[in-house]
Amino acid sequence: MTPEPGETTALAERIKARIRAAGPISVADYMAICLGDPEQGYYMRRDPLGLAGDFITAPEVSQMFGEIVGLWLAHMWEAAGRPSPFALIELGPGRGTLMRDALRATRIVPGFLDTARLNLVETSPVLRARQREALAAVGRQPTWHGSVDTLPDMPTFLIANEFFDALPIRQYERRDGAWVERMVGLDDDGGLAFGLGAGRLAATDTPVAVDGAGNGAVLEMAPAATAIVSRIAARLRDRGGAALIIDYGYARAATGDTLQAVRRHAFADIFTTPGEVDLTAHVNFEALAAAIRTEGAVAHGPIEQGPFLMQLGLAERAHKLAAGRDDDTRTTIREAVERLVGPEEMGQLFKVLAATPAGKSAPPFDSATLAPQDR
Ligand code: SAH
């Protein structure tokens, strides 16, 4: 959507005032304020999901997504020896749709729902209310957390769909052999603009794969994402369980500026209306997998969402769901499958990464036909 000339927001004015007073801020700080400012942050005041909102996610495309994820979690719980009690956790549950569908599907798994302690990590009061409603419809009351720090210390079975893309990233620009931190400052007219700061990325933190990058290349680091994944991996190592991370992103460390703003299903400007647009960055799955391994847990994948869902029976589930239904419903189901697995749609860009304790396998990751792709 093209912003109106001169369009601004109260949050934009506050950020500019802060920069005028104290100097440029990191891209990570800019993202964190735009998304999470308690009064004017993007997620704090709205439900951004759905047709009338800004974007649509896989669980909102079809109930089949949450069902498959739920059955995967229940399978991993059974394979772990049915620990009881255990924490069933979702990070960034949006409208609660995925968890609702997962809980409905796992009723057929004896003991799973009875022993599950449902814990949601969510900062948005608006979305917490939506989640409460969605889960009340299946008779469940979750416990909410503002961060992963307060999650219960027990065997953990966790899902995060389109959560990590919303976490703040830092950006670095290549200048004469160094990675110099990109900052958000003010241009000559007093508007928000990128500039370079004094910060340099330490050579030890630089992925080998980007060593030869030329001037102007952009490298992204996601310290907040890494910290959260490390905590989860440590929990899996100590208490057992499994985690599934699904998001758009890349399987191998690479350069590229992936910071993007989205409003009403179209790309928007990052600086024009902060607080009114969703800001995300592609997820670096190689970095997340490395963080999992550093904690002594096992990273499975990443693999692409298309093969992941197909191997776990999406086509069969769609077939069953469509049986005996009218033409419109069958078309809707067929289109949902295409949207979830089509290579031009969500099937290839979205990746799935699992984590388990050492010595555990996780379907369908350990099958030889599904080597990670270099995308
Ligand atoms: N998983 C859902 C929603 C994705 S949108 C789905 O697939 O439909 C991102 C979700 O993460 C929202 O619920 C948002 O409020 C939440 N979120 C974003 N940043 C967060 C943070 N720092 N801590 C906790 N939740 C966050």
Image: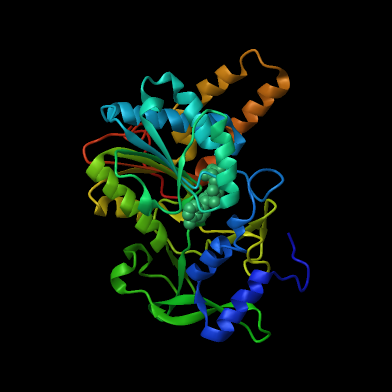
Any part of residue 173 in sight:
yes
Drawn side of residue 301 relative to residue 194, left or right: left
In the image, what residue occupies the spot 61% across and 59% down? 42
Drawn side of residue 93 relative to residue 269, left or right: left
In the image, what residue occupies the spot 61% across and 14% down? 323
Spot occupied by residue 345 in the image (x, y as percentages of width and height): 59, 42
Residue 341, picture quadrant: top right
Drawn side of residue 245 relative to residue 98, left or right: left
Residue 304, picture quadrant: top left
Residue that extends furthest to the top in the rendered view of this protein: 324
Spot occupied by residue 146 in the image (x, y as percentages of width and height): 45, 53
Please say if 83 is above or below 274: above
Give the number of marks: 0
Residue 90, picture quadrant: top left
Please say if 339 is above or below 21: above
Please say if 256 is above or below 246: below
Spot occupied by residue 339 in the image (x, y as percentages of width and height): 60, 37
Q: Quadrant of the N terminus?
A: bottom right
Spot occupied by residue 203 in the image (x, y as percentages of width and height): 30, 73
In the image, what residue occupies the spot 68% across and 23% down? 329
Any part of residue 57 in sight:
no
